[in-house]
Image: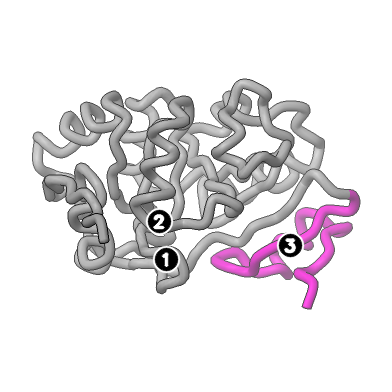
Amino acid sequence: MTQEPIIATRFFTVNDTRALPAALQALRRGEVIVFPTDTVYGVGCTVWDPRAIERLYWAKRRPEELAIPVLVAEVGDARQVARDLPPTFEALAGRFWPGGLTLVLPRQPRVPAILSAGRDTVAVRLPDHPFARELIRAAGGALAVTSANISGQSAPRTAEEAKAALWGRVAVILDGGPCPVGTASTIVDLTVSPPRVLRQGAIPYEALREALPALLPREG
């Protein structure tokens, strides 16, 4: 059996002056990094390099039929990866971003198809975490990011949990302490009419429905 390649992982706290430059250097090289968000720790790479996205799938053993979300630094950055934003986007993003809400939107054609598992949609979130937003902003405003765990395992709330799962599979791990929310984001599909909750998470359905009365609950 061929042994999997082992990556020399570097570990920093987010207040280490070397942390941000090391993470940005890794991203520019098409490598994969782990960093804290408001919900859970994320593992991510540049949005624009299909080879980097392939490494991200490999790092967490994620099935390629599962799309990878995008985290953005500002509301306007969603337009980098999404097109034809519906009025429902403003209704929800205006109220719940930054925060634990992921919105499924029509994908910009220039976004690599591998990111969205060949679909014409992209899932986008604006995290409520100062360091995460600083990192994403410095990286160009958008990163491909999913939870920093081996696929199928629990999403990590701490850097140590992420380290236990992904050490040797990513280039850099950044420790920002426990994630304040500790629960994965709620996902809402805005490409269907009426919009529907796909995953219940940090933002409760009742709060979302106050902003968008037509919203349907998660099936099942």
Residue 42 marker: none
Front residue of 107/76: it is 107
Q: Residue at x 60, y 52 (%)?
A: 65
Magenta segment includes 198 = yes
Q: Amino acid at mark 1?
A: Val
Crowd band around label 3 with a 10 angstrom C-alpha radius: few (<14), some (14–19), many (20+): many
Q: Residue at x 9, y 35 (%)?
A: 17
Residue 38 marker: 2
- In the displayed structure, would residue 164 be above or below residue 147? below
Colour scheme of the picture: one colour
Circle 2 sits in a helix, a strand or a loop, which is it? Answer: loop
- In the displayed structure, would residue 5 be above or below residue 160? above
Q: Residue at x 78, y 78 (%)?
A: 220
| Label 1 close to label 2 by CB (< 8 Å) | yes
Crowd band around label 2 with a 10 angstrom C-alpha radius: few (<14), some (14–19), many (20+): many
Magenta segment includes 16 = no
Q: Main secondary structure of the magenta part?
A: loop
Q: Tell me: 171 left or right of 217.
A: left
In this view, the residue farthest toward the front is 1
Q: Amino acid at mark 2?
A: Asp
Q: Position of residue 148 (x, y in %)?
A: 36, 58
Q: Tell me: 117 left or right of 174.
A: right
Chain part drawn in magenta: 193-220
Q: Position of residue 70 (x, y in %)?
A: 52, 41
Circle 3 sits in a helix, a strand or a loop, which is it? Answer: strand
Mark nearer the N terminus (2 vs 3): 2
How far apart are the two marked residues, 1 and 3, measured between alpha carbons? 19 Å
Q: Position of residue 13 (x, y in %)?
A: 14, 50
